Image (cartoon, rainbow, N blue to C red):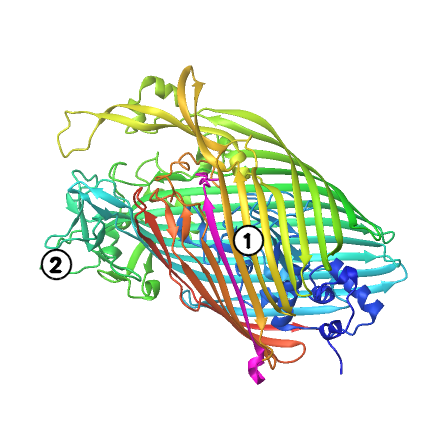
């Protein structure tokens, strides 16, 4: 009978330097799982030398063995997931895949500071409660060309990966920058396998809310040729993925204190949104390898390309009626229900206003905008690398590496808003989704009210406004490194490693303002109704909204919105809206602004250059302590960063735009100061640091080990917060109106003056965050695919990135003003502490078919103390309000106290199945929502996914996968006072996804 490698291992005597029970298994499994070329080479050598006949362990069991042994043999604390394991679950991106690992969580919104737009697949990774995560391809830098530091993991196809490693502490040879952790994406290479490999997979995914299907496929080919001059290997891997999803959002507006009773708080109506996402990913990776006949030289050239596009469109209904937000009242004959705090729970809302510019009655339904929004994003990363390994003898190993990255990111975000009026019924009582009703704006409880079709009547909908935003970024980096390792014989010092690395990164960000402008309004000459012009609009059905039972609209759940096809055609939008413009000074495209070059003016273009130089020394130890084997490493890493940032000072734009502009009556000195001038500047900064690290691993028994890790780490500031800009604007304007204007007529301003000036600012001299990281783990590996591990971790962090305030004098156009400058700075200290527990096992001892059962569990608990929230917006060119946090003593943004994953596995008789549940507790999503300006919390929630595959033959398998099978409703809450009271802000419903999959390997 053939024996598996594991069975043969039990019969072998363990040598002094290979005492741990599963180390040979680890090397074999890692090699068979195509995780790393080095591991595969070592496995092949041992296989030849010892003539061990290896039986490959496939399926989920093999995947768990692979990940388990990567963790067990690592030089520091880490977790891993193999390519095959990612493929066994319905994860469409690397981001979704790593969310199943201990201590890792993801966000489900398009951006943390924009919790009004659900992301379905997620858009940010958090490791042990922190977002300062470093990203790598094959141990090298990897980044997207946004304003951040890292890679958009949601844009990376898992089909390109051989494995993903999440390092939670550091060694001296690792590139600096990961206080929270380092996520390393290992791509596949030809020498990972022994010979030719051809594989492909294809699936089609159906989304039940969107009711559409989308395809995904990938193909891989690799081969190895032995020649007289050595061994050659070639690999090419391509993947294409599409997904079409929908999310429906119900939101309560900001609760406003009412003038008619200042103990009562009523929401600004409801926001209803219907958002559809079309995402495509194309990934390509290829490598060419050569090894000489003496096996002393290995050369690897590699190219990786990731291209992701996201096109989403949204129809949203939201109140925008500043005239009446503090006079929201129940319709006649009814009353509101309030909780004990005076917070609205149920009722039918109308409004009162002293003057309405559109001529509506003083008691009437609130004005709501009818938004059609289109956003197109494209992110491309091209990564070129060359690596040379030279091992002339058993003692010396030299590694040389060079890399070039070029990344681009483009965003086109366009909205056109119509408007109509409505009386709104809201029932927010109890749990579950709310009940919303929309009624004719004249409805006021009349017994003889005859229902009509007010929301599909072109004569009651008018063209209100438009807004455009463009982003066009590019970044490139050249990096090279040299590593030398010398191994000693018969010494407690196993080896010494020395290395140096240099990188030069340049990034240009072009990010326009969000260019809002009026089309027609009562205060902008007059309203232009849909019925009075040929500007196109669409009838959009909200039937089955949030799966039904939520929305009830007078005349049916159909509404008029600006035409989607018109909004999608940005280049022709200005001409298309010509008939909707009541004034020439209203909305015009970004490119039509004075001094614009293309879509951007000078103060929206920022250029940053960063040079990084690093040297390290690392000693590796190996020996025996009281009969127990140990291994350790200790090292120092020296880092120097040099930043050069071009920028500007931008003065207020108080130049009158029309004869009704309040700037016409602005204080004379302030009008001179606010002449919309801009001055170009440049700043240079430098930072140096020595980072120590210590890692120690002691094998207590053949199955049990204890591990300790310590390092000092840094997190580099976002490039967005390094911007060298000061953008000044007036604040708290006091306006005096003509007292002779009769009551009820439009007020006429006669004088205006700012009480102060404020400014948003980047900080090119911003220093990295610093942290002392400690880990202590106990790891029990009791079977090939069985382990129980626990880790205590502690981070002592300083130099947080926070929004600070200074007061500076600025002189422009002969006028000097004091300006309160809010900008990025370093400040504050805090700690992150917690523990992780992971358990996995197949129950082989169970009888018959039950022996295929297995389980995989992990749980993370995190405590934070003293950490300040940043109050920064690193993704906007104009974040002057980013630091205005409504309340103090908020928890740390993005940190869930608890994270958990549970999976039930089955593998027997060619069937491989898994049911997995991912859960995280509530957390602060953002300190400041862009709409309500309030802190928003994501409530605790979990998602259930499942998969089942059948091995049709040795080469073919088919399967089904399901995502969000529990129809998870994502809820958010807004904090409404300093005491911490919260009310529900949002309920988001999204698709359940079902996939049919075919895979083959030859």
Q: Residues within 10 Å of mark 2 (few under 14, many from 20)?
A: few
Spatial CA distance of label 2 from label 1 is 66 Å
| Quadrant location of the N terminus in the rendered image | bottom right
Q: Nearer the viewer, residue 144 or 765?
A: 765
Provide residue 339's location: percent of width, then percent of height.
Answer: 21, 53
**Label whose residue precedes the other's in the sequence (2 or 1):** 2
Q: Secondary structure at mark 2?
A: loop
Q: Nearer the viewer, residue 56 or 202?
A: 56
Q: Is residue 147 visible?
A: no
Provide residue 15's location: percent of width, then percent of height.
Answer: 79, 64
Which residue is situated farthest in the front direction here? 626
Q: Residues within 10 Å of mark 1 (few under 14, many from 20)?
A: some
**In the picture, residue 233 is in which quadrant?**
bottom right
| Quadrant location of the C terminus in the rendered image | bottom right
Circles 2, 1 touching at the beta carbon (< 8 Å):
no
Q: Nearer the viewer, residue 982 or 206?
A: 982
Q: Which mark is residue 792?
A: 1
Residue 286 located left or right of residue 375? right
Provide residue 236's location: percent of width, then percent of height.
Answer: 70, 61
Q: Residue at x 78, y 61 (%)?
A: 16
Residue 831 located left or right of residue 785? left
Q: Residue at x 38, y 19 (%)?
A: 672
Q: Residue at x 50, y 55 (%)?
A: 105
Q: Is residue 852 magenta?
A: yes
Q: Nearer the viewer, residue 933 or 601?
A: 933
Q: Secondary structure at mark 1?
A: strand
Please name which of the two marks, 2 or 1, marks the residue nearer to the observer.
1
Which residue range is magenta in the image? 846-874
Q: Is residue 732 visible?
A: yes
Q: How many numbered circles are shown?
A: 2
Residue occupied by mark 2: 449
């Amino acid at each position: 009978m053939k024996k598996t490698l594991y069975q043969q291992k039990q019969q072998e005597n363990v040598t002094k330097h290979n005492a741990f029970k599963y180390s040979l298994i680890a090397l074999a499994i890692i090699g068979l799982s195509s995780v790393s070329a080095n591991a595969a080479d070592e496995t092949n050598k041992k296989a030849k030398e010892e003539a061990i006949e290896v039986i490959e362990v496939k399926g989920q069991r093999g995947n768990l063995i692979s990940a388990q042994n990567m963790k067990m043999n690592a030089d520091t604390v880490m977790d891993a997931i193999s390519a095959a394991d990612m493929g066994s679950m319905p994860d469409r991106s690397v981001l979704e895949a790593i969310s199943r690992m201990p201590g890792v969580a993801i966000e489900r919104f398009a951006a943390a500071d924009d919790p009004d737009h659900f992301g379905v697949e997620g858009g940010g990774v958090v490791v042990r409660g922190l977002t300062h995560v470093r990203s790598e391809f094959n141990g090298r830098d990897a980044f997207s060309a946004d304003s951040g530091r890292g890679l958009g993991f949601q844009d990376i196809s898992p089909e390109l990966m051989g494995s993903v490693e999440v390092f939670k502490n550091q060694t001296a040879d690792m590139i600096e920058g990961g206080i929270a952790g380092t996520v390393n994406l290992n791509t596949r290479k030809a020498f990972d396998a022994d010979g030719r490999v051809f594989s492909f997979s294809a699936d089609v995914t159906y989304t039940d809310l969107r009711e559409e299907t989308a395809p995904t496929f990938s193909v891989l080919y690799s081969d190895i040729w032995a020649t007289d001059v050595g061994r050659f290997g070639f690999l090419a891997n391509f993947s294409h993925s599409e997904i079409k999803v929908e999310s429906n959002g119900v939101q309560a507006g900001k609760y406003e204190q009412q003038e008619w009773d200042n103990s009562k708080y009523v929401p600004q109506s409801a926001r209803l949104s219907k958002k559809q996402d079309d995402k495509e990913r194309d990934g390509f990776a290829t490598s060419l390898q050569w090894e000489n006949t003496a096996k002393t030289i290995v050369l690897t050239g590699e190219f990786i390309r990731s291209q992701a596009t996201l096109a989403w469109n949204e129809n949203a209904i939201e109140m925008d009626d500043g005239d009446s937000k503090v006079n929201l009242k129940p319709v006649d004959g009814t009353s509101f229900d309030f909780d004990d705090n005076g917070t609205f729970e149920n009722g039918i809302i109308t409004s009162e206003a002293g003057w309405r510019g559109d001529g509506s009655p003083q008691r009437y339904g609130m004005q709501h905008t009818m938004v059609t929004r289109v956003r197109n994003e494209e992110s491309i990363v091209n990564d070129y690398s060359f690596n040379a390994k030279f091992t002339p003898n058993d003692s010396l190993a030299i590694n040389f590496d060079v890399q070039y990255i070029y990344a681009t990111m483009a965003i086109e975000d366009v909205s056109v808003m119509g408007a109509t009026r409505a009386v709104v019924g809201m029932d927010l009582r109890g749990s579950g989704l709310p009940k919303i009703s929309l009624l004719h704006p004249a409805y006021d409880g009349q017994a003889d009210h005859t229902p009509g079709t007010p929301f599909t009547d072109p004569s009651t909908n008018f063209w209100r406004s438009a807004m455009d935003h463009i982003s066009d970024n590019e970044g490139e980096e050249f990096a090279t490194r040299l590593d030398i390792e010398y191994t000693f014989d018969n010494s407690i010092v196993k080896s010494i490693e020395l290395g140096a690395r240099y990188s030069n990164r340049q990034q240009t960000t072009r990010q326009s303002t969000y260019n809002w402008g009026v089309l027609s309004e009562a205060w902008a000459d007059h309203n232009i109704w849909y019925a009075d012009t040929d500007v196109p609009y669409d009838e959009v059905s909200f039937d089955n909204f949030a799966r039904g039972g939520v929305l009830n609209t007078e005349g049916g759940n159909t509404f008029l919105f600006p035409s989607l096809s018109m909004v999608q055609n940005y280049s022709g939008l200005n001409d298309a809206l010509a008939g909707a413009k009541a004034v020439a000074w209203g909305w015009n495209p970004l490119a039509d602004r004075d001094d614009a070059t293309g879509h951007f003016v000078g103060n929206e273009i920022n250029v940053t250059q960063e040079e990084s130089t690093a040297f390290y020394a690392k000693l590796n130890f190996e020996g025996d302590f009281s009969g127990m084997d140990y291994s350790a490493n200790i090292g120092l890493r020296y880092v120097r960063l040099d930043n050069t940032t071009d920028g500007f000072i931008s003065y207020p734009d108080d130049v009158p735009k029309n004869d009704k502009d309040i700037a016409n009556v602005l204080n004379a000195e302030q009008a001179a100061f606010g002449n919309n001038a801009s001055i170009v500047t440049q700043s240079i900064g430098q930072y140096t640091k020595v980072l120590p690290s210590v890692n120690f691993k002691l094998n207590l028994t053949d199955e049990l080990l204890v591990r300790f890790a310590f390092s000092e780490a840094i997190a580099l500031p976002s490039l967005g917060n390094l911007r060298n800009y000061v953008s000044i604007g007036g604040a708290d304007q006091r306006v005096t109106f003509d007292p002779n204007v009769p009551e009820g007529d439009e007020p006429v301003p006669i004088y205006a003056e700012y009480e102060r000036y404020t400014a948003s600012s980047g900080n090119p001299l911003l220093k990295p965050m610093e942290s002392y990281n400690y880990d202590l783990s106990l790891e029990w590996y009791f079977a090939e695919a069985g382990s129980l591990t626990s880790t205590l971790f502690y981070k002592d962090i300083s130099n947080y990135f926070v929004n600070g305030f200074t007061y500076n004098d600025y002189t422009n156009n002969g006028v000097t003003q004091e300006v309160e400058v809010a900008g990025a700075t370093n400040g504050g200290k805090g700690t992150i502490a917690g523990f992780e527990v992971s358990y996995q096992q197949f129950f082989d001892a169970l009888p018959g078919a039950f022996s295929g059962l297995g389980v995989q569990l992990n749980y993370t608990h995190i405590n934070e103390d003293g950490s300040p929230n940043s109050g920064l917006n690193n993704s906007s060119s104009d974040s002057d309000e980013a630091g205005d946090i409504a309340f103090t003593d908020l928890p740390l943004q993005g940190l869930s106290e608890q994270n958990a994953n549970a999976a039930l596995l089955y593998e027997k008789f060619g069937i491989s199945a898994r049911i997995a549940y991912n859960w995280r507790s509530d957390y602060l999503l953002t300190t400041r929502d862009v709409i309500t300006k309030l802190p928003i919390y994501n409530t605790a929630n979990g998602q259930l996914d499942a998969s089942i595959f059948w091995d049709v033959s040795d080469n073919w398998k088919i399967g089904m996968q399901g995502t969000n099978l529990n129809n998870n409703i994502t809820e958010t809450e807004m904090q409404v006072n300093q005491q911490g009271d919260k009310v529900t802000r949002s309920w988001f419903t999204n698709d359940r996804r079902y996939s049919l999959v075919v895979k083959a390997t030859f």
